[in-house]
Image (cartoon, grey):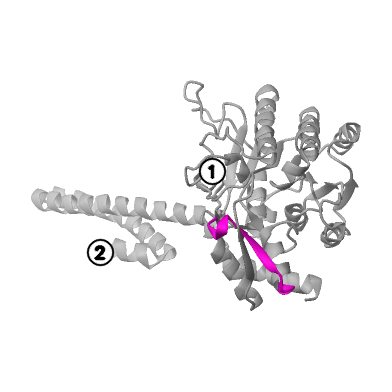
Amino acid sequence: MNIAEGAARSGGREFLQYLFIARGSLSELETQILISKSLGYIDEVESVMSHINELFAKLGGLIHSIQQKVVKKMTLHISHLTPHEESSAASPQKILVTGAAGFIGSHLCIRLLERGDEVVGLDNLNDYYEVSLKKARLARFSDHENFSLVKMDLSDREGMEALFAEEKFDKVVNLAAQAGVRYSIENPQAYIDSNIVGFTNIIEGCRHTSVKHLVYASSSSVYGANETMPFSVHDNVDHPLSLYAASKKANELMAHTYSNLFDLPTTGLRFFTVYGPWGRPDMALFLFTKAILEGKAINVFNHGKMRRDFTYVDDIVEGVIRVLDKTATANPEWTGKAPDPGTSKAPWRVYNIGNSSPVELMDYVGAIEKALGMEAKKNFMPLQDGDVPATYANVDDLVREVGYKPDTPVEEGVAKFVAWYREYYSV
């Protein structure tokens, strides 16, 4: 190892000192060379200069290598900013969060308020599941000085128009929707009212008040009959298996239309099986935990032969915030001759947000059993209508363009949910 390499590898300060010394020495060396030439030592001087040129060529390469490593480390650091660092990097904004009393929405409101944003939360507090849980979620942040709640249904056209006109939001996150694949078979009209009519009112409000960025919840359900794994945003998603999935696909198409016609930046987020504290009672983790604690059997569909890309709620919220702060832009390389389903010539984007690590359903049940210290009684049943046997998120676009990848292990996330459940229900 030569002197330059040793100084470079020993630390940045020592390396800089070496460069200053080397630069100062060059001036002195040039003087010595002139004297040597005048005394007739031409061959010796040329030999020395050859070695010097070789040394500095190596030094230049070493400097370039170090610069690349420094840039890489800085990029990695920036992509994993803590909430505190993140808040100091962004100016406060007025943000509308629909579905504020919901599972993901309530977690998002807290994070946005913590970083200094003004949040207007909208929710109709319907009785799709226990309203008391929704109110308990709201109670965690409803008294914050920068939060206000509007109780309204998305399908209220006049009310939504008035809200947008009065508040003049900087950005909007639309998480309000009629959720659930199976319920869409029983009550399809609820999905039309909320997910289609309601979304129309949201996107119209954004258009007429020049909202800077609309981020909205799509779903992994849009992949439908697609069996190519992992699911990529560049895959065709024209074969939904439920009305819920069709409504989410419709949202993506409607958003693209507005991005194209009115230059409204929109980003759709395809969430993959979100779980965690304050979750929805109609989801597997909630249902399984409740049944096991009550000594009842759990229904295991497709005879347990299912895989899901379970994604912890904090990871979902982190992804939402990072995407919200990165306004959608057009893809300059997009062409209608080979149209890419995941980007556009308009300021429109869709991203998968998933753990990119599918878990077997029986392993998921095992994690719940471990966290509870109890074994589940199991009813093995066939695959339900509208359901799919496996999900698996390709998050390459999210990592490359947003610099983020969810990574909470299922065992850790399930344990946190069980701890919350026991405390909340005192069991």
- Badge 1 is on which residue? 401
**What residue do we see at 52% from left, 53% from top?**
356
Queried whether the magenta region covers residue 304, the answer comes back as yes
Queried whether the magenta region covers residue 299, the answer comes back as yes
Mark 1 Cα shell of 10 Å, populated few (<14), some (14-19), many (≥20):
few
Give x and y (percent) for residue 401: 54, 43
Q: Is residue 335 left or right of residue 413?
A: left
2 or 1: mark nearer the eye: 1
Q: Which mark is residue 2?
A: 2
Three-letter code, disc 2: Asn
Which one is in front, 233 or 381?
381
**What residue do we see at 65% from left, 39% from top?**
268
Residue 19 higher or lower than 244, as above or below: below
The span from disc 2 to disc 1 (Cα, nearest Å) is: 40 Å
User: Which image quarter: residue 380?
Assistant: bottom right
Q: Is residue 8 left or right of residue 390?
A: left
Three-letter code, disc 1: Glu
Q: Quadrant of the N terminus?
A: bottom left
Q: In this picture, which residue range is highlighted in magenta? A: 293-306
Nearer the N terminus, badge 2 or badge 1? Answer: 2
Q: Is residue 267 left or right of residue 336?
A: right
Which one is in front, 138 or 168?
138
**Is label 1 in a helix, a strand or a loop?**
helix
Q: Is residue 421 left or right of residue 227?
A: right
Q: Quadrant of the C terminus?
A: bottom right
**Is label 2 in a helix, a strand or a loop?**
loop
**What residue do we see at 63% from left, 51% from top?**
319
**What residue do we see at 65% from left, 38% from top?**
267
Residue 273 higher or lower than 228, as above or below: below
Give x and y (percent) for residue 343: 55, 33
